[in-house]
Image (spheres, rainbow, N blue to C red):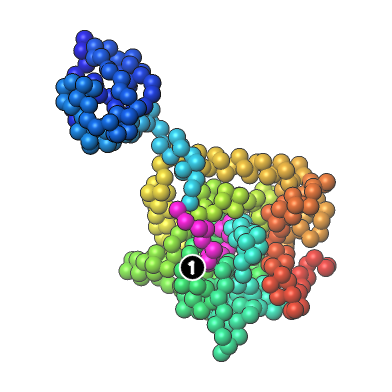
Amino acid sequence: MPLHTPDLCPCRLQAFSSCTQAGPPPSQALGWNTEVSVRPVSQGALLGVEGPQTSDFPLLGRPPWASTQCFWAMLLLLALAVLLLAGIMHVDVGLLMPQLGDQADGPPVTNVMFLKTHKTASSTVLNILFRFAETHNLSAALPAGGRFHLGYPWLFLARYVEGVEQGGPRRRFNIMCNHLRFNPPEVQKVMPNDTFYFSILRNPVFQLESSFVYYKSHVPAFRNVASLDTFLASPWTYYNQSLGLSNAYARNSMWFDLGFDNDAPPEEGYVRARLSDVERRFQLLLIAEHFDESMVLLQRLLRWRLDDVVAFRLNSRSRRSVTSLSPAGQERAKHWCALDWRLYQHFNRTFWARLRAEMSPRRLRSEVARLRERRRELAALCLQDGEPKNQSQITDLRLRPYQPGRADILGYNLRPGLDNQTLQTCQRMVMPELQYMAHLYTLQFPDKPPKNIAFLEA
């Protein structure tokens, strides 16, 4: 049965040979029974140097623009066929061409400000940023002198950064990621205008539980109560609002880190206005419960390599030091930290909306799997036994993390016998926060006294 073919270009199927230089016409190559004979043409005719030869085009002749239109018509048909096939098979076109999907649209972003919130997996993000700064010879805005934070819990001031002198020439840095309480005008004094701002949030129920264990001996509201459930059953018995900054970790601490009043009433108008402030100041808010998806999105937006965002969990607790809140306690935590709860709910929604806008679900699953596989490879390469250790098991004292309160913070042992380059890479990935900050400080300010990490000398 003859195949009806619409006139997509001036040359019919009889003239397909004028659009291809070798091989059978598409109809024969695909096995179609078109009952149409195709006459060959000479090389000169294909190049258009013999002039129009009506003997080769018995039906229409050969206008000078025929080959060009045939070419584009065939290209359009090919593109439509690929898209149709992808739709039928539910395939992400980006996965069909991974080389193109991995190409960045421009150079990597090198000016980054990360608001390091508390007990939100932020130490792992800090390690990623410190590694990027060191391997790319970038400057970091580090705490001045012997300090280990940028003025926290007071609002940040530019003079808290080493190398910034009050009244002196303005100095800008590439990376900023130490703990601070966000104060945009002062941050802008030390960061370039094109800085990428981002932060990370965690479900406030679990963030509060972690804070309770980690800061129990430091926060007045937590000191004299046996458990978080007990505290939440009657929080005003233990929480003295007049103590202000001393109790910042005990209520709405993520809201506080953003520079807002953690004791403010959660009135709708106030909350909406502050959420709008955050959206205006930050390009991205990550979600700790979806850390791998967060890293995939961060890598994409910063145009970094995969290895730049692969990390091991740092400053994490052993299971025995994690407590579980009762269902009633979890509801009380949401009420007690109502501002953090609204913050988390809002930016959890925007996070997934951003991911959907950036890539298909299939592509996201593929990228997350690739990230996890690379982490497994690096763990097998770097880590002894491939898992974290408690403090007593860590043999290299320089790799022991700080142990606060009742938390049992885990660290890592490296495999013996690593070559120098591999050892350096692996050390960077497992170096605890305080030690890495002291290391970068010495690199950036070799003429200043090094930072003293007291617990390593005890």
Point 29% across, 34% down: residue: 48
Magenta part of the protein: which range?
105-122
Which residue lies most toward the top here?
A: 1
- Asked where in the image residue 72 lies, by quadrant, the reply is top left
Which residue lies most toward the left here?
A: 60
Main SS class of the magenta portion in the image = loop
- Asked where in the image residue 213 lies, by quadrant, the reply is bottom right
What is the number of callouts on the image? 1
Q: Nearer the viewer, residue 11 or 264?
A: 11
Point 83% across, 67% down: residue: 458
Amino acid at pointer 1: Thr
Per the image, is 108 magenta? yes
- Asked where in the image residue 247 lies, by quadrant, the reply is bottom right
Left or right side of 295 for 381: right
Which residue lies most toward the front here?
A: 50
Residue 70 screen position, x and y as percent: 26, 32
Q: Which residue is mark 1?
A: 195
Q: Nearer the viewer, residue 244 or 77?
A: 77
Tell me if residue 94 comes above or below residue 286 in the rendering: above
Residue 135 screen position, x and y as percent: 65, 60
Label 1 sits on a secondary structure element that is: loop
Left or right side of 46 for 122: right
Tell me if residue 446 comes above or below residue 303 in the rendering: below
Point 78% across, 67% down: residue: 455
Residue 29 screen position, x and y as percent: 36, 18
Per the image, is 424 magenta? no
- Could you tell me if residue 87 is visible in this image? no
Point 21% across, 12% down: residue: 2
Q: Label 1: how many residues lie within 10 Å, few (<14), some (14-19) or many (20+)?
A: many
Residue 319 screen position, x and y as percent: 67, 48
Q: Nearer the viewer, residue 347 or 263?
A: 347
The quarter of the picture where the N terminus appears is top left
